[in-house]
Image (cartoon, rainbow, N blue to C red):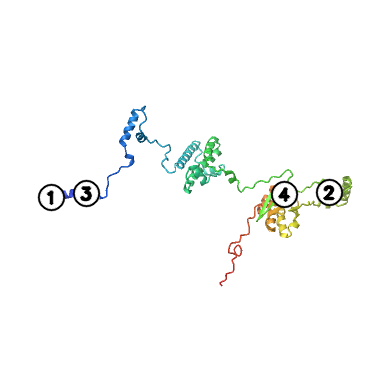
Amino acid sequence: MNVLRVQWQATSFLRRRHTLYPPFHRYSHSSTFVPPSQLNNVSSRFRTRRRNRDNEGADELPKHENTDAVAKSKPESPSFYTGRATYHDSLIELQNAINRTRATLKTLQLLPLPDFARESLKPMPPVWKTAAEMSQEFDTSMTTSRYRRVTVLLNELNQYLRIATTAGYSDLATMIDGVLGMFESGKKESYLTRGERKPVILDRFGRSYTVGKRKTGAARVWMIPVRTDSSASRSMMTPPGVSDAATEDSVMDILDTKDTKTQEQRITVTASTILINNLPISEYFPLPQDRERVVRPLKIAGVLGKYNVFTIVRGGGTSGQSGAVAHGIAKGIFAHEPETGSVLKRAKLLRRDPRMVERKKTGLAKARKRYTWVKR
């Protein structure tokens, strides 16, 4: 019985030993262990470094020992071993700038702002560089997620710039503006001013020069107010060989004979001229609808007969050219009398009519019309 007990204890011990410490498997193709290259000549390198520390003024070591003895210096950037060190370093710098600015604004009791104060901040819309331009700055391809990550930080810093500028802290605003200036686009001014109407400047003769477009036609329009000088009109009406004094006496005699009520009801109408390509409007546009389209801005603004219009129009047909002339006349009226802008805008005369003929498609009879389908 004792022998059986001893055998049973031995077998149970071996079972527990194999469970805790499984045996190593040996394969027929196994070879000796090859250490990595960083473990080569470890002892020689330590001896060389100790020798250099003891003998600092000694001669230069042999080449093979000197190469092993070179110690790796600490990288300047914590992102040195990443694939995009410049990108991550820039993100770290932006985040540090945001943290410092936020702490400064909290010290000045400018954060957090209530909603009504945030709405009253000075508008400063940012225009950042495109992803392609930032790719050169960050030395990496700017994907959508990377570009979004950068712009989110820049927008937050731009919000702090608005707060500092509105509060009057110019030094802080200048520092923030210097950081944001590195990421702003060079086309910021042109981008922000797009869609704004450029003011028309009158020349020394009081003329306005505008350009109107419709379909494929383009018109250059010059407008000048009609002269209402009484002396000029009187000199034009005076027959040759008759003095001005005699003319005035005759006119006064005629006016005295008329009734005073008729004199009060008299309305002076000035005659204006509309020349298109050096031809009167009635000769250049024989169709009534084209002439009506040209005169429509003058009627709506209530300045019919107040301006002389000279136009050079090119391209397109009669409807396109008449629309281009009307567009240029409306812009000229707005330049002379800005108070008529609301009326002209309501009539949609100051904007270019974008409607154009749709181009013909290949395989179709017209833009959308198809040929009749024939089975045989």
Callout 2: SS: helix
Residues marked 3 and 1 touching at CB (< 8 Å): no
Taking the image as shown, residue 262 lies to the left or right of residue 211, namely right
Tell me which residue sits at (14%, 50%) in the image. 7
The picture places residue 152, in percent across and down from the top left corner, at 49, 45
Tell me which residue sits at (75%, 57%) in the image. 283
Tell me which residue sits at (12%, 51%) in the image. 4
Callout 3: SS: helix
- Spatial CA span between label 4 and label 1: 124 Å
Residue most extreme to the left = 1
Amino acid carrying mark 2 in the image: Met
- Spatial CA span between label 3 and label 1: 20 Å
Tally the numbered discs: 4
Which of discs 3 and 1 lies nearer the camera? The answer is 3
Which of discs 4 and 1 lies nearer the camera? The answer is 4
Residues marked 3 and 4 touching at CB (< 8 Å): no
Amino acid carrying mark 4 in the image: Trp
Taking the image as shown, residue 120 lies to the left or right of residue 77, namely right
Q: Residues within 10 Å of mark 1 (few under 14, many from 20)?
A: few
- Spatial CA span between label 2 and label 4: 24 Å
In depth, the one of 264 and 18 nearer the eye is 18
Amino acid carrying mark 3 in the image: His
Please report whichever mark, 1 or 2, sits nearer to the chain's N-terminal start. 1
Q: Which numbered marker is on residue 18? A: 3
The picture places residue 95, in percent across and down from the top left corner, at 46, 40
Q: Which numbered marker is on residue 222? A: 4
Q: Which numbered marker is on residue 236? A: 2
